[in-house]
Amino acid sequence: MTSPTRGAVRVARCGVIGLSSGLLAVVVHAGAGGHVPALPHVLAFAAVVGWACGPLTDRQVGFGEIVALVVSVQVTMHVFLAVVSRHPDGVLPSPSMLSAHVLATAVVVGALTGAERAVFRLAAALASVVPRRLSPPPAVAPLRIPIAGHPEQPLAEVSRRRTVPRRGPPVS
């Protein structure tokens, strides 16, 4: 079970990854002569990227994973922007567009790698200073109280009682 703080940190990490990757892709795409989509399209794309990176946020993400994530976001964002701007011939990037996306990838990877290290160093420093709980957490399971019941009987005894009733002499 995750704590509310841990959940908020996961949402914040996903949001930073989605917004930094998506918005920087839009900025360099527009800077290289591409079309700028409407803000709701960009925010929807950033939200999808943030949602997609959710499984990565339960641990520290390495450099290779960040590179793979950002490269896939840059490629997907370029294709998305080409389709939204209704220029299917713009799916293959021009040299200036390709260099702009490579530069954006390098900037985002550098920023996210540094932020990732800083967040986990800060968390380790706080964990070493914050006092830990000395008593075990309270029990949350329901208390079970044993209730005396019928003594268990062997299955043979139960089946014999039900199938072969005892018969005595007829009542006169």
Image (cartoon, rainbow, N blue to C red):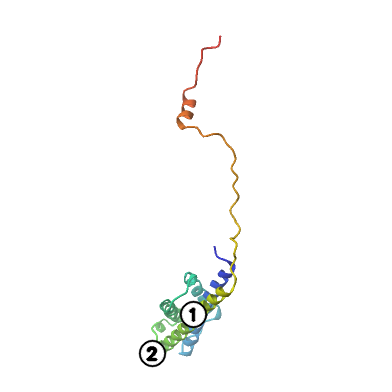
**Residue 102, x across and y down, in percent:** 42, 86
| Residue at point 60%, 62% (across, down) | 135
Residue identifier under label 2:
95
Earlier sequence position, callout 2 versus callout 1: 2
Total label count? 2
Give the CA separation, mark 2 to mark 1.
33 Å
Under mark 1, the amino acid is: Arg
- Taking the view exactly as shown, the residue that stands out farthest to the front is 134
**Residue 39, x across and y down, in percent:** 55, 80
**Residue 63, x across and y down, in percent:** 42, 79
**Residue 82, x across and y down, in percent:** 44, 81
Q: Is residue 127 left or right of residue 93?
A: right
- 62 or 14, nearer to the observer: 62
**Res. 55 visible in picture:** yes
Kindly state the secondary structure of the residue where label 1 is placed.
Answer: helix
Q: Which mark is residue 64?
A: none
Kindly state the secondary structure of the residue where label 2 is placed.
Answer: helix
Under mark 2, the amino acid is: Pro
Q: Quadrant of residue 72?
A: bottom left
- 41 or 11, nearer to the observer: 11
Q: Quadrant of residue 147?
A: top right
Residue identifier under label 1:
117
Q: Quadrant of the N terminus?
A: bottom right
Q: Is residue 36 left or right of residue 97?
A: right
Please tell me whether residue 90 is drawn above or below residue 141 in the rendered image. Answer: below
- 118 or 73, nearer to the observer: 118
